Image (tube, rainbow, N blue to C red):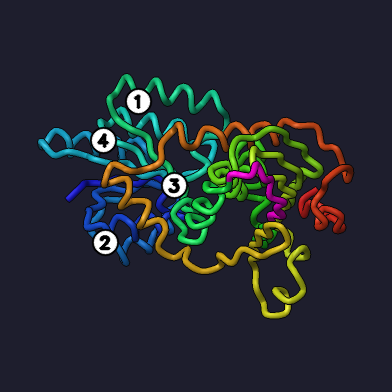
Amino acid sequence: MQHFALIGVAGYVAPRHLRAIKETGNRLIAAMDPTDSVGVLDTYFPEAAFFVEFERFDRHLEKFRQKGQNLHYVSICSPNYLHDAHIRFGLRQGADVICEKPLVLNPWNAEALQRNEQETGHKVFTILQLRLHPVIKALKQQVAVQTTGKKYDIDLTYITARGAWYFASWKGELPKSGGIATNIGIHFFDMLIWIFGSVQKSEVHQHSHDRAAGYLELEQARVRWFLSIDEKTLPTTVQERGGRTFRSIRIDGQELEFSEGFTDLHTESYKGILDGQGFGLRDAAPSIALVHEIREAEVRGLSGEYHPLAALPQAKHPFK
């Protein structure tokens, strides 16, 4: 049994990590979050120590080690801009680290963490769960055997509606979240690069508070992409049934059906990490570099190969 600590346990994604720790037969010894709405712990680890102050959390882990017990992993579900600091904390604890995506916001943060790995002898892992989805794995195998030099034409659409709260939280602040492309798009960009090869060209047609759109040319694909948190950009059929999320990948005009099979991917990610097969800094680096480039790029407007949904009217920022 491995001992875990978790930072950011009140966050949206934390229950997936708690479930993964539980389902892999391990133990959460301590959790920390400045927000105390953490009743979810009762479902998984009611005996875990909980702290709202980082200093007390740190002290508890120190006492744990002084008793001759090992902390094996620190899981990180904190806001994006805190990831690199919390990763360094975990490494200094003498533990390996499992961090939610985006692993870090900038390429140089990832480079610094590689040095921290070397200094501590411990590893940093991230959650790239789409790489574990059966449909995505099958697509990668299909593309890998393609020998004709073909470039696929792809439309990527991901819409996950969010309310006004989003813009009042850290997620709505570009320096803290990295913006829409980073916060909700990075795992799709990782998946595309993993399957279709490195980025040869990138254009940004939109990048605002509630959406981003652009064009990528990869070694084996041309990609028009659109990401949004505005519910008005959802397809009418989704809105009529009360849906809040729409994800679509069309490859050469054919829909890739992968709407199911997401439930257990965090647990599968943990299994891989515990077996020594997890995704690390080098795996995450290409998508980190891409979203940083998107964040810094000039917004071209609706020109060139833009995604059709980029032409939809844009909502005003709710607090501006």
CA–CA distance in space, label 2 to label 4:
20 Å
Seen in the picture, residue 295 relative to 25 is either above or below; the reply is above
Q: Are marks 1 and 4 in contact (CB under 8 Å)?
A: no
In terms of depth relative to the viewer, which is nearer, 219 or 37? Answer: 219
Q: Which amino acid does the dot numbered 2 rest on?
A: Pro
Seen in the picture, residue 297 relative to 234 is either above or below; the reply is above
Residue 148 is inside the magenta segment: yes
Q: Which amino acid does the dot numbered 4 rest on?
A: Arg
Q: Which amino acid does the dot numbered 3 rest on?
A: Ile
Mark 1 = which residue? Answer: 117
CA–CA distance in space, label 4 to label 3:
28 Å
Q: Residue sitting at 43 percent across and 26 percent down?
A: 113
Q: In the image, which disc is placed on residue 46?
A: 2
Q: Secondary structure at mark 2?
A: loop
Q: Secondary structure at mark 1?
A: helix
Q: In the image, which disc is placed on residue 59?
A: 4
Q: In the image, which disc is placed on residue 127?
A: 3
Q: Secondary structure at mark 4?
A: helix
Mark whose residue sits in front, 2 or 4: 2
Residue 189 is inside the magenta segment: no
* Of the image marks 1 and 4, the number of the one nearer the N terminus: 4
The mark total stands at: 4
The crowding category of the residue bearing disc 4, from other C-alpha atoms within 10 Å (few below 14, some 14 to 19, many at least 20), is few
Q: Residue sitting at 65 percent across and 41 percent down?
A: 149
Magenta stretch bounds: 147-156
Q: Are marks 2 and 3 in contact (CB under 8 Å)?
A: no
The crowding category of the residue bearing disc 1, from other C-alpha atoms within 10 Å (few below 14, some 14 to 19, many at least 20), is some
Q: Which amino acid does the dot numbered 1 rest on?
A: Glu
* Of the image marks 2 and 3, the number of the one nearer the N terminus: 2
* Of the image marks 1 and 2, the number of the one nearer the N terminus: 2
* Of the image marks 4 and 3, the number of the one nearer the N terminus: 4
The crowding category of the residue bearing disc 2, from other C-alpha atoms within 10 Å (few below 14, some 14 to 19, many at least 20), is few
